[in-house]
Every structure is written in structure tokens, then in C-alpha cells.
Image (cartoon, helix red, strand yellow):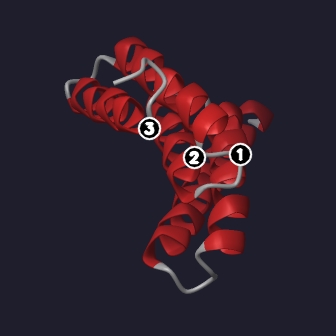
Amino acid sequence: LEENYPSIATSYNNIGNIYNKLGKYNEALENYNKALEIRKERLGEKHPDTAISYNDIGVVYYELGKYNEAMENYNKALEIRKERLGEKHPDTKQTKENIKIAKQKLKELQVKREE
């Protein structure tokens, strides 16, 4: 297969999932970003698989405590999922829940800063 074939992106994403579960977040991000670039190039910015990459990147940033970066990626995923899958799709609902949790963390950090 070509280096930028969509199935290669799926493999990168799966490798990223393994690294994420192992807590090796830099390696996870590296693989998720490779998957994202292939998906954007081959499938387009608005493809549901591209949304998977954005969501997964958001998860890693959340784990790293980089909640603004997590929100940025979650919001990109949500936009695609709402448009392509609809409001009631489980993936759309999952991304909305991810955003809710990240917003809560940001609020908690703000309260701590103000104390």
C-alpha cells in the first residue's frame, strides 16, 4: 500500500491507541497525528475518520492536562460528527461528553487559580 493510504492511517491510529493505554502519550500523539494527516489528505477534513483522529488527539491532551488543546481537538471532532453523523449518533454524544468533562476541569483550574 501507499504510505498515505487510509488503511495505513487506521494502523497509525491503532498504534496510538496502544501507546495511549500504556500512558506513553508522546508516542500516542505522534501516531495519532500521522493518522490525522493521512486522513485529511486522503479522506478530507470533514470525514468521520478524521473526527476519530481529532477526538483521540483530544483524549491525549486531556491526559496530559492540556485542557485547552483537548477542547480544540474535541470541538473539531464534534463539528464533523454533528455534520456527518448527526446529533444522536453515539460518537457525537461521546465527543460532547468529552467536552463536558474538559470544561469541568478548566473550571476547576480557574477556581484554584483564584484561591
Label pair 1/2, CB-CB below 8 angstroms: yes
Q: Which residue is mark 3?
A: 6
Real-space CA distance between mark 3 and mark 1, rounded to the nearest whole angstrom: 13 Å
Which structural element holds mark 1? Answer: loop
**Label drawn at residue 45:** 1
Which image quadrant for residue 68? top right
Q: Amino acid at mark 1?
A: Glu
In the rendered view, would you say 16 is above or below 56?
A: above
Q: Is residue 109 visible?
A: no
Q: Nearer the viewer, residue 16 or 67?
A: 16
| Mark drawn on residue 60 | none
Q: At x 61% / y 57%, what residue is drawn?
A: 99
At mark 3, the secondary structure is: helix
Q: Is residue 82 visible?
A: yes
Q: Which residue is mark 2?
A: 50
Most distant residue in the bottom direction: 88
Look at label 2 and name its amino acid.
Thr
Query: Mark 1, residues whose alpha carbon is within 10 Å: few (<14), some, or many (≥20)?
Result: some
Q: Is residue 103 above or below residue 11?
A: below
Tell me residue 92's x, y (percent).
Answer: 55, 71
